[in-house]
Amino acid sequence: MGSARETDITRRKRLAAGVSVLSNVLLTVSKFAAFLLSGSVSALTEALHSVGDIVASVLSYAGVRVGDAPADQEHPYGHGKVESFAGLAEALLLVGAGLYVGYVAIARMLNPQPILVDVALAIISAAAVWNLFVSRYIQRVAEQTDSEALRANAFHLTADVYTSVGVLAALLLVRFTGNPIFDPLIALALTAWILVSGGRIALRTYQTLIDMRLPQHEVDAIIEVLRRHPAVLGYHQLRTRKAGSQRHVDAHILVEDALSLVDAHAITEEVEDLIRAELPNVVISLHTEPYRQEAAHRKHEHGDQIDTTCSDR
């Protein structure tokens, strides 16, 4: 059942990444058409921003395909971090797009030019609505599959929606006031939002790449399983990390000394299954130890007691 579920997750991730690539190609073509027909530099900025989205979508698609590849001899822990690298690359592209929008906005403020507003309004409006639906779809799949690459891609597309709305607001102000200065002013304001969004994505993917532990609520869920199981007398050395959408959990659990190897193994398997029921896409490695013998060893060798409540010893 777990294998079938992982296959379904992989299929949904790849479909979402493919939709993102196709959508961004269509959006880029439409925005370049808006620029050529209207002469709007804002439309050109949107088109160039969408070129960055195409690159981001391709990175997301590649990251999802490679990141979901099973473990092999050369990569015994799988390829999950490829997905995080793709997410980090997308975040850097988002920051780059923000800097470019700011540059173009300042250039337009210094040298405003007349534009044919109506054509640009029609095409950018349609593109913004379409992009909104696509970004929401990809964000939903990212949350369902816990994909860092898709999550970064969704943020990228959402940023594109906001920049489109800003461009539309600027075009409307230009249309009703006849003053082209509103175009670069709003674009410059949106630059700050794009840079903040890119920075947040970069920070989250960076934390994954340096093996930061799982979020506290997920760690608490693991601890609750260990504490609730009647045969687990204690635990220590609980360690967690994440690679792409794959969680890794390992810990030492303590059981009654007199248990047979078969019974201890059965308890270990049961605990692992309970943790899998709490967390999706998780790889678990539990080391089972005899409680009293380990307590005596710790006291003799280290002069301390087994801490059955500490989550990260």
Image (cartoon, rainbow, N blue to C red):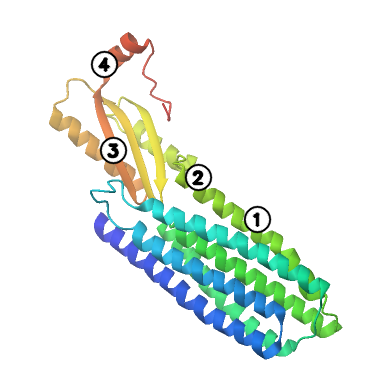
Which one is earlier in the sequence, the residue at label 1 or at label 2? 1
- Badge 1 is on which residue? 196
Q: Within 10 Å of the Cα at label 2, are there few (<14), some (14-19), or many (20+) other Cα atoms?
A: some
Residue 207, numbered circle: 2
Q: Within 10 Å of the Cα at label 1, are there few (<14), some (14-19), or many (20+) other Cα atoms?
A: some
Q: Quadrant of residue 43?
A: bottom right
Residue 292, numbered circle: 4
How many angstroms separate mark 1 from mark 2 (CA)?
Answer: 17 Å
- Badge 3 is on which residue? 285
Which one is earlier in the sequence, the residue at label 1 or at label 4? 1
Q: Within 10 Å of the Cα at label 4, are there few (<14), some (14-19), or many (20+) other Cα atoms?
A: some
Residue 26: image x %, image y %? Answer: 51, 81
Residue 226: image x %, image y %? Answer: 34, 33
How many angstroms separate mark 2 from mark 4 (CA)?
Answer: 37 Å
Secondary element type, mark 2:
helix
How many angstroms separate mark 3 from mark 1 (CA)?
Answer: 37 Å
Which one is earlier in the sequence, the residue at label 3 or at label 1? 1
Secondary element type, mark 4:
helix
Which one is earlier in the sequence, the residue at label 4 or at label 3? 3
> Pointer 3 and pointer 1: residues touching (CB < 8 Å)?
no
